[in-house]
Amino acid sequence: MYQQRLTFECFENTTIDSAQQAIMNVLDALRYNGQILGREFPCSLENGTFSCHVVTPEHDALHPHFYSLQVSHAMSKLSEANLLRPKIKELGRELFSDECENGEDSQAMILYTSFIHSCSPLRSMERFLPIPLYRIPSVANGDQRQIIKWQEDWSACDQLQMNGSILETQCVAQMSEPGTRLFQRGQDLTKRISYVSHKPTYLYLYRVGGTSLDEERQRRCPLCGREWYLETPLHDLFDFRCDHCRLVSNLSWDFK
C-alpha cells in the first residue's frame, strides 16, 4: 500500500466551510469506492492550499480510470467551492500495510476481515492478499459502499468480542452463526461479487467455543451438512471449506 498526498488549490476566493465540505465529499466517495483506506485523513491548510494525506491500495489507485460515478460527481462539485481537482503526489510505500494484488490471476476470492485490518476485505484464494475493491465491478449503486459497511460492522463486532467487556455474546453470534443479520449480508455480498466478477467468492465464518478438538474436526458445514474439514489448513487459518455453500471457517480458537 502507498501513502499519497492530495493537494487542493483554490482558483478563486473560497470559505473554509465550503472547501471543507467539498473535500470531505471527495474523500468519502474515494473511500466508498475502495480507492483510499481507513476513516481518518489528516488535512491541513497552508497558504490557501488544502492538503490531505491518504493511504491507497496501489500506487495508481487514484487514477480517474477507477472512479465510480460518485467519485466523478464529487470531483465535479469541487469547482462550486472554487477548488481545482487535486494534485496527487506519491510519498512512498506504507510500511505496516499488506501487499495487494489486482485479482486478475485469482481463480476464487474470500470475503474476510478483522478488527486489525483496514485493507480491502476481499482477498485472493491463492495467496490471501487483498484485492482492491475498485478492481471489481460495483455490487450496487455504482460504488462498493455495501462491502465497506459490512466490513465496518464485522470489525466492530470483532473488536467488541476481543475487548470482552460488553456485547461479547451477541457479537460472536453475529460473526459465527448462519441466519444472523451480519452473516446474511455477507452471504448476499459474496453472491453478488461472484456474479459481477465471474469468480467463486467465499464467506469467512468465525468459530470459537466447542467442547473438544476431536468434536471440532467432526463439524460439518452448517448450511448443507456436508463434510468440509481440510487435512491441510488453507493459509494456516481456514480449517474448513465448503465449495457447495462457499464458506470457509477455522477450528475453534479455543483449540488452535
Image: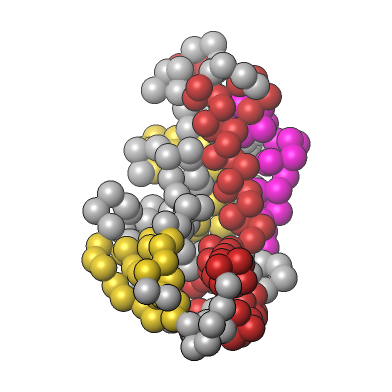
Q: Residue furthest bottom?
A: 11
User: Where is residue 101 drawn, in percent x and y?
Assistant: 36, 65
Q: Which is more toward the observer, 22 or 16? A: 16
Main SS, magenta region, reads: helix
Q: Which residues are magenta?
A: 172-194
Above or below for 213 versus 21: above
Q: Which is more toward the observer, 100 or 179? A: 100
Q: Which is more toward the observer, 223 or 82? A: 82
Q: Residue at image x 39%, y 81%?
A: 87
Q: Which is more toward the observer, 100 or 68? A: 68
**Residue 77 covered by magenta stretch:** no
Quarter of the image with the N terminus is bottom left
Above or below for 95 versus 180: below
Q: Residue at image x 51%, y 52%?
A: 39
User: Where is residue 106 drawn, in percent x and y?
Assistant: 42, 66
Visual colour scheme = secondary structure
Q: Residue furthest top?
A: 211
* Quarter of the image where one finds residue 227: top right
User: Where is residue 95 drawn, in percent x and y?
Assistant: 24, 53
| Count of numbered badges drawn on the protein | 0
74 sits left or right of 107 in the view? right
**Residue 181 covered by magenta stretch:** yes
* Quarter of the image where one finds residue 21: bottom right
Q: Residue at image x 37%, y 74%?
A: 47
30 sits left or right of 146 in the view? left
